[in-house]
Image: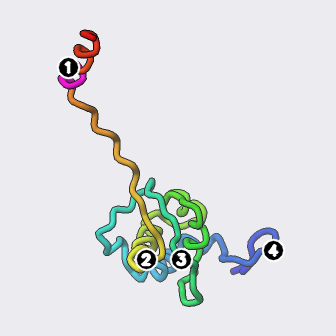
Amino acid sequence: MSDQRRGGTPGPDPSDAESPERLYVITGGRAASTSRRSIDLVSLVVALAAPDPMTPPEQGAILRLCHTPLSVAEISAYLRLPVSVITVLLSDLADRGGVQVRGPVPIAVLPDRELLEAVINGLQRL
């Protein structure tokens, strides 16, 4: 298969990107992360280090992409890899200290209705 994309830029052949064999090799045969980290589509990822010469190509690409925070969904789209593969790679990078993964900001818990009514009543008495 061709080692060049359209425009003559060297890169992997897009038709090979989703082959099960390639995905198996990229993840080391793991279907899910072995880490306890919770990584989902909206988790933000930022690189803490630059890739070194021994970094696998896909992990190096993640480190280069994440010099500014990106979501897992964006990384998956840019690298044209399934989210499940990206989460395995990210957990490996996070365990080695290469990236920081931040979960989404939780939805604020609404205050108790009785408390709000007491505050409103107190303000009305002023």
Q: CA distance from mark 4 to mark 2?
A: 35 Å
Judged left or right of residue 119, residue 74 is right
The x and y percentages for residue 21 are: 49, 80
Q: Which residues are magenta?
A: 113-118
Q: CA distance from mark 3 to mark 2?
A: 8 Å
Q: Residues within 10 Å of mark 3 (few under 14, many from 20)?
A: some
Q: Nearer the viewer, residue 3 or 124?
A: 124
**Where residue 118 is drawn, which disc sits there?**
1
Name the residue carrying label 3: 49
Q: Nearer the viewer, residue 33 or 108?
A: 108
Q: Earlier in the sequence, mark 1 or mark 2?
A: 2
- Amino acid beneath label 2: Gly
Name the residue carrying label 4: 8
Farthest residue, direction right: 7
Q: Earlier in the sequence, mark 3 or mark 4?
A: 4
Colour scheme in use: rainbow
For the N terminus, the image quarter is bottom right
Q: Earlier in the sequence, mark 4 or mark 1?
A: 4
Q: CA distance from mark 1 to mark 2?
A: 48 Å
Q: Earlier in the sequence, mark 3 or mark 2?
A: 3
Q: Earlier in the sequence, mark 4 or mark 2?
A: 4
